[in-house]
Image (cartoon, helix red, strand yellow):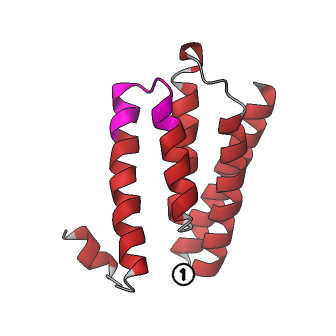
Protein backbone atom coordinates (compact mmCIF):
# COMPACT_ATOMS: atom_id res chain seq x y z
CA UNK A 1 0.00 0.00 0.00
CA UNK A 2 3.01 2.27 0.50
CA UNK A 3 3.66 2.50 -3.27
CA UNK A 4 -0.03 3.17 -3.88
CA UNK A 5 0.03 6.05 -1.41
CA UNK A 6 3.20 7.53 -2.92
CA UNK A 7 1.81 7.35 -6.46
CA UNK A 8 -1.53 8.79 -5.38
CA UNK A 9 0.09 11.63 -3.43
CA UNK A 10 2.27 12.52 -6.42
CA UNK A 11 -0.80 12.48 -8.67
CA UNK A 12 -2.66 14.83 -6.32
CA UNK A 13 0.29 17.26 -6.16
CA UNK A 14 0.44 17.36 -9.95
CA UNK A 15 -3.33 17.76 -10.16
CA UNK A 16 -3.18 20.78 -7.84
CA UNK A 17 -0.42 22.30 -9.96
CA UNK A 18 -2.58 21.71 -13.05
CA UNK A 19 -5.47 23.51 -11.38
CA UNK A 20 -3.23 26.50 -10.63
CA UNK A 21 -1.93 26.54 -14.21
CA UNK A 22 -5.50 26.40 -15.55
CA UNK A 23 -6.52 29.23 -13.22
CA UNK A 24 -3.56 31.29 -14.49
CA UNK A 25 -4.63 30.75 -18.10
CA UNK A 26 -1.86 28.31 -19.01
CA UNK A 27 -3.98 25.60 -20.64
CA UNK A 28 -1.05 23.77 -22.23
CA UNK A 29 0.78 23.47 -18.91
CA UNK A 30 -2.43 22.42 -17.15
CA UNK A 31 -3.04 19.68 -19.71
CA UNK A 32 0.55 18.40 -19.42
CA UNK A 33 0.37 18.32 -15.61
CA UNK A 34 -3.04 16.61 -15.71
CA UNK A 35 -1.61 14.01 -18.06
CA UNK A 36 1.29 13.33 -15.71
CA UNK A 37 -1.11 13.12 -12.74
CA UNK A 38 -3.32 10.71 -14.68
CA UNK A 39 -0.31 8.45 -15.31
CA UNK A 40 0.56 8.32 -11.60
CA UNK A 41 -3.03 7.75 -10.49
CA UNK A 42 -3.51 5.00 -13.10
CA UNK A 43 -0.42 3.24 -11.79
CA UNK A 44 -1.70 3.53 -8.21
CA UNK A 45 -5.10 2.09 -9.18
CA UNK A 46 -3.53 -0.82 -11.06
CA UNK A 47 -1.67 -1.91 -7.92
CA UNK A 48 -4.90 -2.51 -5.99
CA UNK A 49 -6.21 -6.08 -6.31
CA UNK A 50 -9.63 -6.62 -7.87
CA UNK A 51 -11.35 -8.02 -4.80
CA UNK A 52 -14.14 -6.90 -2.53
CA UNK A 53 -11.75 -6.29 0.37
CA UNK A 54 -9.99 -3.61 -1.73
CA UNK A 55 -13.07 -1.43 -1.92
CA UNK A 56 -13.79 1.40 -1.84
CA UNK A 57 -10.11 2.33 -2.35
CA UNK A 58 -9.82 0.54 -5.69
CA UNK A 59 -12.86 2.09 -7.36
CA UNK A 60 -12.08 5.54 -5.92
CA UNK A 61 -8.58 5.45 -7.44
CA UNK A 62 -9.97 4.32 -10.81
CA UNK A 63 -12.57 7.10 -10.67
CA UNK A 64 -9.85 9.62 -9.86
CA UNK A 65 -7.58 8.34 -12.64
CA UNK A 66 -10.47 8.46 -15.12
CA UNK A 67 -11.28 12.03 -14.08
CA UNK A 68 -7.68 13.05 -14.67
CA UNK A 69 -7.69 11.30 -18.07
CA UNK A 70 -10.87 13.23 -18.86
CA UNK A 71 -9.20 16.52 -17.89
CA UNK A 72 -6.43 15.98 -20.44
CA UNK A 73 -8.85 14.64 -23.06
CA UNK A 74 -7.46 11.10 -23.04
CA UNK A 75 -10.90 9.72 -23.96
CA UNK A 76 -10.00 6.08 -24.55
CA UNK A 77 -7.91 5.90 -21.40
CA UNK A 78 -10.75 7.47 -19.42
CA UNK A 79 -13.21 4.92 -20.82
CA UNK A 80 -10.90 2.03 -19.94
CA UNK A 81 -10.35 3.31 -16.40
CA UNK A 82 -14.08 3.80 -15.90
CA UNK A 83 -14.68 0.23 -17.08
CA UNK A 84 -12.09 -1.09 -14.62
CA UNK A 85 -13.62 0.91 -11.78
CA UNK A 86 -17.08 -0.40 -12.60
CA UNK A 87 -15.82 -3.99 -12.88
CA UNK A 88 -14.98 -4.16 -9.19
CA UNK A 89 -17.30 -3.60 -6.27
CA UNK A 90 -17.82 0.17 -6.20
CA UNK A 91 -20.03 1.75 -3.58
CA UNK A 92 -23.29 3.30 -4.77
CA UNK A 93 -21.72 6.79 -4.64
CA UNK A 94 -18.69 5.77 -6.71
CA UNK A 95 -20.89 3.80 -9.13
CA UNK A 96 -22.89 6.96 -9.74
CA UNK A 97 -19.74 9.08 -10.14
CA UNK A 98 -18.23 6.61 -12.63
CA UNK A 99 -21.48 6.40 -14.59
CA UNK A 100 -21.81 10.19 -14.76
CA UNK A 101 -18.18 10.51 -15.81
CA UNK A 102 -18.74 7.88 -18.50
CA UNK A 103 -21.62 9.92 -19.96
CA UNK A 104 -19.53 13.09 -19.86
CA UNK A 105 -16.54 11.41 -21.57
CA UNK A 106 -18.79 9.92 -24.26
CA UNK A 107 -20.42 13.31 -24.90
CA UNK A 108 -17.20 15.31 -25.02
CA UNK A 109 -15.34 12.75 -27.14
CA UNK A 110 -18.28 12.75 -29.57
CA UNK A 111 -18.17 16.54 -29.80
CA UNK A 112 -14.45 16.39 -30.51
CA UNK A 113 -14.81 13.78 -33.26
CA UNK A 114 -17.53 15.92 -34.85
CA UNK A 115 -15.31 19.00 -34.48
CA UNK A 116 -17.97 20.79 -32.43
CA UNK A 117 -16.66 23.34 -29.94
CA UNK A 118 -18.84 24.57 -27.12
CA UNK A 119 -17.84 27.34 -24.78
CA UNK A 120 -17.82 26.61 -21.05
CA UNK A 121 -20.89 28.76 -20.59
CA UNK A 122 -22.73 26.69 -23.19
CA UNK A 123 -21.71 23.44 -21.50
CA UNK A 124 -22.89 24.72 -18.13
CA UNK A 125 -26.33 25.53 -19.50
CA UNK A 126 -26.88 22.02 -20.91
Residue at left 64%, top 48%?
12
Q: Which residue is mark 1?
A: 25
Residue at left 75%, top 41%?
7
Residue 45 image position (x, y, % from top left)? 65, 37
Q: Residue furthest top?
A: 53
Residue 71 image position (x, y, % from top left)? 52, 63
Task: Specify start and end residues of the magenta stretch as a single range.
Answer: 85-96
Query: Left or right of 104: which side holds 83?
Result: right
- Snapshot quadrant of residue 77: bottom right
Above or below, 72 relative to 11: below
Count of numbered marks:
1
Q: Tell me, yes or no, if residue 9 can be seen here.
A: no
Residue 113 image position (x, y, % from top left)? 42, 79
Residue at left 69%, top 52%?
13
Q: Tell me, yes or no, if residue 122 can be seen here.
A: yes
| Along the viewing direction, whichever of 73 and 29 lies nearer the viewer | 73
91 magenta-colored: yes
Quadrant (top left, top right, bottom left, bottom right) of the N terminus: top right
Q: Residue furthest right?
A: 3
| Along the viewing direction, whichever of 10 and 43 lies nearer the viewer | 43
Above or below, 83 relative to 17: above
115 magenta-colored: no
Crowdedness near tag 1: few (<14), some (14–19) or many (≥20) residues, C-alpha within 10 Å: few
- Snapshot quadrant of residue 96: top left
Residue at left 79%, top 27%?
2
Query: Left or right of 73: which side holds 34?
Result: right
Please, what secondary structure does the residue beneath circle 1 have? loop
Residue 10 image position (x, y, % from top left)? 74, 47
Above or below, 21 relative to 67: below
- Snapshot quadrant of residue 106: bottom left
Report the predominant secondary structure element of the magenta stretch: helix
Amino acid sequence: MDNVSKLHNQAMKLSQRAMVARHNGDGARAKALSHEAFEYESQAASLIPDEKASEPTRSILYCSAASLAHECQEWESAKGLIKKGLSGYPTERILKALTNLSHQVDFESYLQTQKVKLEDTELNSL
